[in-house]
Image (spheres, grey):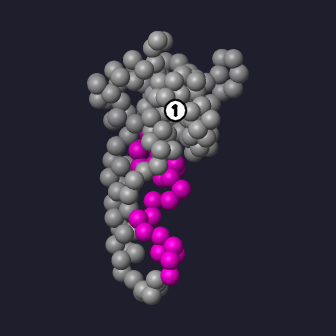
């Protein structure tokens, strides 16, 4: 299983905003810091805001910031909000003679849930407590 760029960028946006809690950050600033297309970033930020992870403000003094404390943002919850599906196998993708009576689907669902549960053991604050990561995020926020 591989997470999408959408999820990767979502986590990076939250980390960037979390490392700069003293101010609103702009989408242009985040796009430049991570070399992400501004149009793609708009979609990511929109989903994060809809999911309650980011608060956005429009206008000249606008920008984005965390909608709640970093200690309350669990990594697994972000992944679930950003991914369209975490299914390991799509049983409906092709007809399967075991459909309806297959124990493999339950095993995969159990593994998927264990993955999300493990991610939820970590919060955004945990990610930001790493001094190297926090330092890099601060450096990325400095004007060139």
In the displayed structure, 22 sits above or below 38; it is above
- Residue drawn at (45%, 87%) of the image: 97
Query: How many residues crowd mark 1 within 10 Å: few (<14), some (14–19), many (20+)?
Result: some
Question: Which residue: 50% across, 59% down?
Answer: 85
Q: Nearer the viewer, residue 11 or 5?
A: 5
The part of the chain drawn in magenta is 72-95
- What x and y, as percent, mark residue 4? 47, 49
Mark 1, secondary structure of its residue: loop
- Image vertical order of residue 128 relative to residue 142, above or below: below
Residue placed furthest toward the top: 144
In the rendered image, the quadrant that contains the N terminus is bottom left
Residue 63 position, x and y percent, is 61, 24
Location of residue 80 in the rendering, given as x and y in whole percent from the top left corner: 48, 52
- Decide whether residue 73 is among the magenta residues: yes
Q: Residue 47 location in percent, x, y?
A: 59, 43
User: Quick one: which residue is furthest to the left in this view?
Assistant: 131
Magenta part, dominant SS: loop
Q: Nearer the viewer, residue 64 or 6?
A: 6
Residue highlighted by disc 1: 36
Q: Is residue 116 above or below residue 7?
A: below
Judge whether 128 appears above or below 22 on screen. Answer: below
Q: Quadrant of residue 24?
A: top right
């Amino acid at each position: 299983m591989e997470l999408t760029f959408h999820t990767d960028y979502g986590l990076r946006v939250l980390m960037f905003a979390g490392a700069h809690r003293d101010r609103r950050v702009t989408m242009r600033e985040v796009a430049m810091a991570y070399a992400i297309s501004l149009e793609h970033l708009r979609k990511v930020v929109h989903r994060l805001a809809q999911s309650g992870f980011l608060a956005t403000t429009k206008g000249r003094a606008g920008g984005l910031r965390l909608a709640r404390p970093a200690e309350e943002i669990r990594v697994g919850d972000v992944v679930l909000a950003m991914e369209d599906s975490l299914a390991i196998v799509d049983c409906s993708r092709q007809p399967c003679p075991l459909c309806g009576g297959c124990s493999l689907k339950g095993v995969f669902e159990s593994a998927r849930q264990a993955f999300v549960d493990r991610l939820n053991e970590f919060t955004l604050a945990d990610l930001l407590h790493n001094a190297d990561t926090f330092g890099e995020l601060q450096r990325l926020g400095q004007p060139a």
